[in-house]
Structures are given as structure tokens and as C-alpha cells.
Amino acid sequence: MLRKSANDIKIMKDKEPIVCLTAYTAPIARAIDGSVDLMLVGDSLGMVLYDYENTLQVTMNQMIDHAKSVVGATTKSCVIVDMPFGSYEESSNKAFKNAARLMQETNCNGIKLEGGYKISKTIKHLTESSIPVMGHIGLQPQSVLIDGGYKVKGKLKSEWQKYIDDAKAVENAGAFAIVLEGMTEPLAAEITSILNIPTIGIGASPKCNGQILVTEDMLGLTNVAPKFVKKYATLDKNINDAVQAYVYEVKKRIFPSKEHIYHMQPEIVKNNK
Ligand code: KIV
């Protein structure tokens, strides 16, 4: 099975739901490769792995290091990498330089950046320069300081037009798909029906063409619990149980046992007698 491309994701729009998860490290990436259509090396890694307060501190070097390990550990799922805050807003040229660096140094399948109409000129420049781009509108975590928090969008119909215009601008700029984050169901449904490219929802209802979650959230490895997260496992408890068993066995000298010990070769034992 060949690795899925951005274009393979694009043409899934009306065929079947598109399954996406984040991956920041080789072990998680290896475990989900091929099961998900798309893996996102999201800048949420700043909060999940580094305990930052928000995603604004994440750097290009961090994104490159994590993306290299995710791409290196996988062969099947499409791998998209987030452009971190500060790497693309200033100008289309700066965005191209950083996006090209992400593509060349990590061998990923494309990049994602946040923003609608305002950033559409940059998206156009990137797609016309052969870089597959995934958009991201609605709740934009990189704008949390100016937005005054993580607020759901589209609760009032009077707000809708802005998000519809944003979505259309991202599509017209050549994006292959768009993330809709933190959005009411009717607005997500409206955008999904207007666009020809797939919408990938996170907290944006089943009306989207696909879904994405932060893997550590759905596995129960984080203690954040937004309404939209469903925990499919409680791995924090499994890890704790395993560690307690290890602690017990080391204290009682049960581990390491015979099968974990290296032995000398018989003839060496003889010569040393
Ligand atoms: O950074 C991230 O993980 C994202 C999501 C869409 C989950 O942007």
C-alpha cells in the first residue's frame, strides 16, 4: 500500500468519512499508521508534550524534529505538518521559505496553517508553488490571546458569513482540505455543503467529511477534557498499573528473572575455572 497523498485525501470528500489523528512521536505514529487516513503533526504538541500554556511557543525546529520522526516511522498514512505561530503570517515569501523547509527536511505530504480570508493570498502562493496546504478555520488556537480564550464559533447566525467567506477563500486559494475547529453543527454542515474540498472537524459535529482528535486525548493520556473529546481508552491508568507492578517486582527482586539475564558462554566458563 502506497502512502496516501494530499490529493487522495481531497478525493475522499463524498466517498467515505476521513479519519485523522495527531502524531508527534515515532511510537504513536507507528501504532496508528495505515489505520488513519491522515496523521497531523500538530502544534498542539506544545501543550501535550511540553506542557506549554498554548501553542504560540512552538518553534519551526520543534515541528521539524517531531515531523521527521513521524514520517520516518510510517509508510501508509498521509502526514501533514502544522506551520507554527510566527512562521507564515508576515509575508507569502516567508511562509514559502518555512513551508519549503518543512517539506524538504521532513519529507511530509503537506502543511497546515491557521486562518481564512486574511491568509488566503499566502495559501495561494504556497499551492501555486507546489506545496499541498490544509486550511484551519473557526476556533484558531494560535489566535487564543486575541480571541480571549477557546470560544465556540457560529452560535449566532449573524457570525456565519465570516466563516463561510473564510472557508471559500481557503478553497479558492487551492487548499486540499480544511479543518473546522470548535464550531456549531449547523455552521459546519453549511460550510461542508458549500465546499468542494473535504472538511475535517474537531468539535464541529459529524456533519464534517472527516474527524480529527489529539491522539493523547482520545487515549486518556491528557487531563484536558473538552466536550468534543471522546476517550476511547484510559492509558494513564494502564501505565500506572504497569509501573506499580514493575516497582513491586524490582523491590521484591522478582525482576529481572532468568529469561532477562545474559549468561557467559560455557567454554569461557570452563577456561576461567
Ligand atoms: O495542532 C493540532 O493538533 C491541530 C488539530 C486540528 C488537532 O491543529
Image: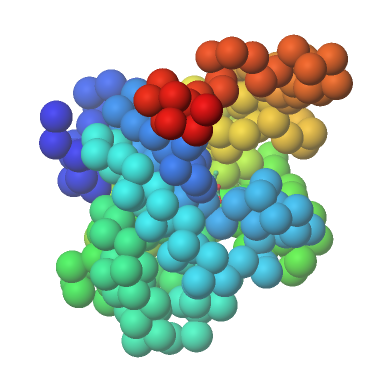
Q: Is 73 displayed left or right of 208 in the figure? A: left
Query: Left or right: where does residue 152 sit relative to residue 201?
Result: right
Q: Residue at x 75, y 53 (%)?
A: 51
In the rendered view, would you say 269 is above or below 21?
above
The image's colouring method is rainbow
- Using the image, determine if residue 256 lies above or below residue 195: above
Percent position of residue 126, x then y: 28, 72
Residue at point 38%, 25% (across, down): 267
Query: In the figure, 236 relative to 161: above or below?
Result: above
Q: Is residue 51 visible?
A: yes
Q: Depth check: give the residue in front, 156 or 1.
A: 1
Give the percent coordinates (x, y) of residue 103.
Answer: 29, 66
Q: Residue 154 appears in which quarter of the rendering? A: top right
In terms of image quadrants, where is residue 251?
top right
Residue 116 at what x, y percent from top left? 47, 62
- Give the residue drawn at x 47%, y 26%: 269
Q: Is residue 1 left or right of residue 182?
A: left
Pick whichever, 223 or 225, lies toward us: 223
Does any portion of residue 199 appear in the rendered image?
no
What x and y, as percent, mark residue 207? 46, 26
